[in-house]
Amino acid sequence: MKNYIPSLRVIELPSNPSYPAIRHTTIEINSIYWPTLHQMSFQFRLQTYRDEEGEYSEYLPADKNLILGLMATHWENDTMPNGLRIISISNENGQHLLLHHYKKHVFDVYFLSLQTNYHYHKKSTIDILLPAVESFFAHDTDGLEYQLNKTRSENDFIRGDFFYIDHTYGYTPERSTREGLWLLWYGLPLGIILLVSGAAALITGKLALSILALFSCAFGIFAWLPGLILHYQYKKDIDDITVKVSRGQDVILVRDGYRSKIFHKSEITSITKYGQSPTSDSPWADYGYFQIEFQSGEVINLSNLIIDQYRVMDKFALEGLGARTAKKIIPFIKHRTNINWFENQEL
């Protein structure tokens, strides 16, 4: 049985990357054959030039004519690429075909087979895309492997961040350990040396040495204790909350177990970056956070315990939002993450 959908919005693409004020244009697929969910054997998703690395639209059912239509609309015209960077197609066997606009009239084709220690790839003109698409939808893996080159080059990247990045951020023991070990590795040995030398000087009982010993003990504690307090405070602030935020989406999804809430980036009133000077050499120099405030008065803090700080502002680049910088020797959190969960939204 055939199913027709008169008009389905697939994804929003920038109408012209050179004019960021023109935010996006909508792709419409009109009166196409659309497989029902139980009939679906192929899926596709898109990445545009406004998306972050590894960010894609949701999977939707696909057939060969749909993919060829997207290619014709966005890659076979005078305004190529018209915002579209990658078409990712998957089949029911877990194999994937990635069509990547590299630059101008140059394209990459990647075939990810079930063998994960290598992949197939070829860089060429747009002429390479059609036979690859034909072979993939015909389940002709032998034909695909013949057209492309088997390689291990950048295999981890292609199957990893290039294929998908989940832009959901939250506290994990692995990241906490990584951040904490650097703090202890750099701060604790220095602190122990100063404490031991200070304690040894105090034992002598001489006044001059005792004063120096007190200073030594104080600096010994200061070398690591503030960092541990920051680590604990940042962990307690985010706790079980996860934040999904990316450049290509104009909403921020916050979850806390069974609760969830959506914020629109247009509701942001201010972003403030708290941290030390980039030239600081204190043991907790990498500790800091971005405080995001909304019109409702709610606050989300994105600390280094959940996300690399240099990545944060790129997620708000399309909105033209800037961050005020507040340099602090010890960047304690001023306002804890505060979400009004009573406005829960079911997704």
Image: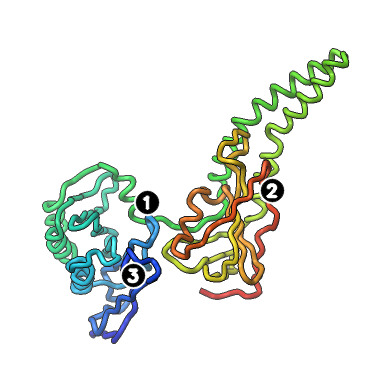
Task: Name the amino acid type tagged 1.
Answer: Asp
User: Residue tagged by mark 3?
Assistant: 13
Q: Are marks 3 and 2 in contact (CB under 8 Å)?
A: no
In the rendered image, the quadrant that contains the N terminus is bottom left
Residue at x 32% of width, y 64% of height: 18
Q: Secondary structure at mark 1?
A: loop
- Spatial CA distance of label 3 from label 2 is 40 Å
At 52% across and 66% down in the image, what residue appears?
A: 252
- Earlier sequence position, callout 1 versus callout 3: 3
Q: Which mark is residue 161?
A: 1
Instruction: Tell me where residue 94 appears, x and y as whole percent.
Output: 29, 59
Residue 93 at x, y percent in the picture: 27, 61
Residue 110: give x, y in percent of width and height.
Answer: 23, 54
Sequence order check, earlier mark of 3 and 2: 3
Query: Label 2, on which residue?
Result: 332
Foreground: disc 1 or disc 3: 3
In terms of image quadrants, where is residue 136? bottom left
CA–CA distance between discs 1 and 2? 32 Å
Q: Is residue 255 left or right of residue 167?
A: right
What amino acid type is highlighted by mark number 2?
A: Phe
Colour logic: rainbow
* Circle nearer the N terminus (1, 2): 1
- Nearest the viewer among 89 and 276 is 276
Q: CA distance from mark 1 to mark 3?
A: 21 Å
Q: Position of residue 150 (x, y in %)?
A: 18, 46
Q: Is residue 74 visible?
A: yes
Q: Residue at x 29, y 48 (%)?
A: 116
Please name whichever residue, 161 or 312, is drawn nearer the observer in this view of the structure. 312
Q: Secondary structure at mark 2?
A: loop
> Image height check: is 44 above or below 125?
below
For residue 88, above or below residue 35: above
